[in-house]
Amino acid sequence: MTRRVALQILLLLLVAGLFGAAFMNAKANLEARNIPTSFAFLWQTAGFGLNQSLIPYSPLDSYGRALLSGALNTLIVSLIASALATVFGFAVGFARLSPHWALARLAGLYVESLRNIPLLLHLLFWYIVLLAPLPAPEHSVSLGGIVLNNRGIYFPFPLLGWPAFEPARNAFNVEGGLRLAPEAAAMIAGLTFYTSSYIAEILRAGVQAVARGQSEAALALGLSAAQTRKLVVLPQALRVALPPLVSQYLALTKNSSLAAFIGFADLMQVSGTILNQTGAALQTLAADMALYFGLSVLTLALMRRIERGSDWGGR
Amino acid sequence: MTDFLRSDFLPALPPPPSREQSWREKLFGDARAAAITLSLLVGAALLLPSVVRYLFIDAVWRAPDGALCRAPGAGACWAYVAAKAPFFFYGAYPYPWRVNLTFALAGVLIVWLLHPRGRAKGYALAGFFLGLPVAGFVLLYGAPALGLPVVGTNLWGGALVSLIMALAGIAAALPGGVLLALGRRSDLPALRWLCVGIIEFVRGAPLIAVLFMANVLLPLFLPPDWAPDRLLRPLFGIALFASAYMAEVVRGGLAAVPRGQDEAAQALGLSRVKTLRLIVLPQALGAVIPGIVNNFVALFKDTTLVAIVGLFDFLHAIEIARLDPVWAGPQIALTGYIFAAAFYLGFCLAMSAYARRLEKKLAAARR
Amino acid sequence: MGVRMGLFVKSQTFGALALAAVLTATVSRADTLDQVLSRGVLVCGVNIGLAGFGLPDDRGFWRGFDVDYCRAVAAAIFDDPQKVRFTPLSGKDRFTALQSGEIDLLSRNTTWTQSREAAQGLLFTGINYYDGQSFMVRKARKLQSPRDLKGASICVQQGTTTELNLADYFHKAGISAETVVFSGGDEALKAYESGRCDAYTTDGSALYAQRLKLAAPDDHEVLAETISKEPFSPVVRQGDDRWFNLVKWTQFALLDAEELGVTAANADALRQSDNPEIRRLLGADNDFGAGLGLSRDWVVRIVKAVGNYGEIFSRNLGDGSPLKIPRGLNAQWRDGGLHYAPPVR
């Protein structure tokens, strides 16, 4: 017993020593290089623009607001992509389980090819594929107030905090309206297709985990194939699929950090710019981690509640 | 629930087909199947010809520069891929043979390690985790004493960097993951919480953030005179990231080893270290080889992110080469991406196919 | 590529860190010229690849304006412009490499700023290229000034002062524009080419070089007006005055040679000139090289090897190169430019 305690104390001392050394080094390094260690920079003027923001933002706003805007961009893109990926993933997953030979094979091809290509390649691909056919602003396509060109899609849409407006042309661009930039669209497309291949597999595994006798029994009881799927198989499959599904959503959110490669202003990109301008390395990374890590902790806690509380609970 | 109660008997189902279904039965067995088949065929008829024309018929296979590829109606520009292949694979590395030799060596060791009938795997293990890093360093970085001129890491690029990142990442992640997983199972609370903290922290962060940390924070936490190389910093980040994910794979393997094994070994008088080394770990790791291979595939795909800290991996080399005015043209980007997709797809599919085969074999052995 | 890192010391995230270490550790470094002589080769830090400034050609031979400065120094020391080993350096690594003694001289389109000299232990030997941040736009737009970019979309690389200058400029001018920020300069350039942006911004010199990467360079132009001052200069370590002088006077000699009409072709012949200024420059009468640790004919060696400033400029950046950068501010003072070298006497 004393040996265990001694071992643990030794370990703690070692860790404390490492942290101490790291802390001392960091302190010396930070001082030597005049790196700010406070969060005061959050209130300074950012001075850089964001091409897509859910909240009103201009370069005259603060770094803090830029970070908030980046975080919101991360969240909204992840949310939309998660929803779309679920729809696509379920469709492909069911196709893969289809008794139809060719359809199942095709769905298998979809899954195997999409998930074995790096996400970054998906994003770069969608970025050029979405940009190339779109017209320049002077040749914008208008459809019932919606304007489409290679700077994005503009919807006439009044939103909280924004003046209600219609898209209008200036010398270069269309201004106003609610805009989806091509960068955001490419992010959503890339994340959706990449993640849908994983979700299809999760669904398939979930359905296959449901004992065969279950659907046989349901059919024998007189349920139709559709009823069997909806009332018997899916509820049980989803119970199995929920935990990996949720970790896929989290992975998608973390994967959205690749935004900087295609010029989308997500949290990582904004904090990268701030890091370069202020040198506040520790603080910006802390802000990033607060979002990603906080989100995972929150989601996992929520999951545990759902598992415990609902009739989906552990078997 | 009474709604679903059937009052009459179902007609007897036809007996399961006693022979393999014919193609016609498979595709046009009933109206539903026929409809699906037809719509798939229509889709293929619409899509396939243009894909085949783009990839093969209209493609430019041989050209001295991009003029032919810029012609309207031209398909994929394979001539560009051929001209740029050395850059895609080696970056600006001046001695391709040194790279080839290193990866041939790695390939032999990996096949030896993963081959189900490989003998004396202890040597392969030692070769992979000890010999290969040393040989790789000497061959790639150079050793003037052996007549190999030094090649600075700033000249490394392309698939060379991608593979080094993935191989070094996995070589570091296996022992790292095992240690973290063992630590997580330890009955010493301090050790357990430390390992859980490391694993969950890294797994909660995107790889880009981990790479940023390795690049920006690592030098901050080290004494000022230890400035790690620009290749080494992202490598550290990747190793840490891969270790955390590997730890979870290994944990699954450890959980699969029946407790009786452990107890029997101790009853036989084996020390704890020996129990671990001779009884528990071989079974645990053997059970999760597919997971390890899948981890490696994921890691290989993730190496595309090192471009964010200024390294030229395979994908980034393709991105850069896109801007050569000799070749620049409307089809260059797509050609490059198709080539990159084929490269990653080929590599990752081969690895995951291996993992799946092994999984089946292991499942059969357990039965 | 070829974009400066932040003006602030702080933003040189790891470069400056290693540097702080070196500052304390390398006070007693040996004389650089002696090291170069005993090594028999000059080690020169250059750009990893920026057309016109430093870029290896198909056979691995380094070419460019900055590269020729390295050759000029090597010619002055060894009478052989090939006795240079080029170390390609990224923006982040360049100062570390100099401070750690890995290179003798940094000649890599580096902007001279106060903080780099005051806080980072560097010495800039003299401006050899006057640059400034500018914009590349489509010719068909017929734009005159960055001011005309009101409401435009502008592609820019992340993490450089370029991004900051851009915001400052538009703020001062009271106009707004959309900035699309990419992690890499090449990605930003590609997005501009694809039509996603109306302008691409970075240093003027880099814009000329990157224009060549476009499929149709002639459809694009670089606006003459700049929005920042970016004076480029070679860099040496502090604490070695002899080496500092040698590099500095190599630069002045190149400029003086151009001013006096001394070229690679006529340098030998002009030693017999009766113009006393030329005779002094070429060491015909007195030995001005000794004070720098060089030979009497040091300027002849330099000019015969790489030509005078005008020849270097023309060959790499100007009319004789694909870049076709106008001399502009980089003309001699007599021609309305800013280059005004002290005399050799």
Image: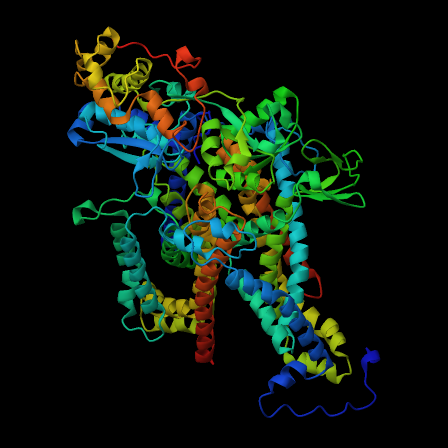
Q: Quadrant of residue C197?
A: top right
Determine if residue A208 is in view.
no
Coordinates of residue B223 in the picture (x, y in percent): 34, 34
Placement of B214 over or under A44, stated as above or below: below
Q: What is the quadrant of the N terminus of chain C in the image?
A: top left
Q: What is the quadrant of the C terminus of chain C in the image?
A: top left
Q: Quadrant of residue B232?
A: top left
Coordinates of residue B248 in the picture (x, y in percent): 48, 59
The residue lying toward the viewer, choosing from C144 and C27, is C144
The residue lying toward the viewer, choosing from A79 and C221, is C221
Placement of A114 over or under C267, stated as above or below: below
Placement of C141 over or under C277, stated as above or below: below
State left or right for residue B112 relative to residue C301. Answer: right
State left or right for residue B175 relative to residue C132. Answer: left
Placement of A27 over or under A181, stated as above or below: above
Determine if residue B33 is in view.
yes
The residue lying toward the viewer, choosing from A289 and A60, is A60
Q: Residue at x 79, y 33 (%)?
A: A163
State left or right for residue A80 relative to residue C229. Answer: right
The residue lying toward the viewer, choosing from B235 and C202, is C202
Q: Quadrant of residue B122?
A: bottom left
Coordinates of residue B14 in the picture (x, y in percent): 69, 91
State left or right for residue A314 relative to residue B207. Answer: right
Scheme by which the image is coloured? rainbow
Coordinates of residue C333 in the picture (x, y in percent): 40, 12
The mark tally for this picture is 0
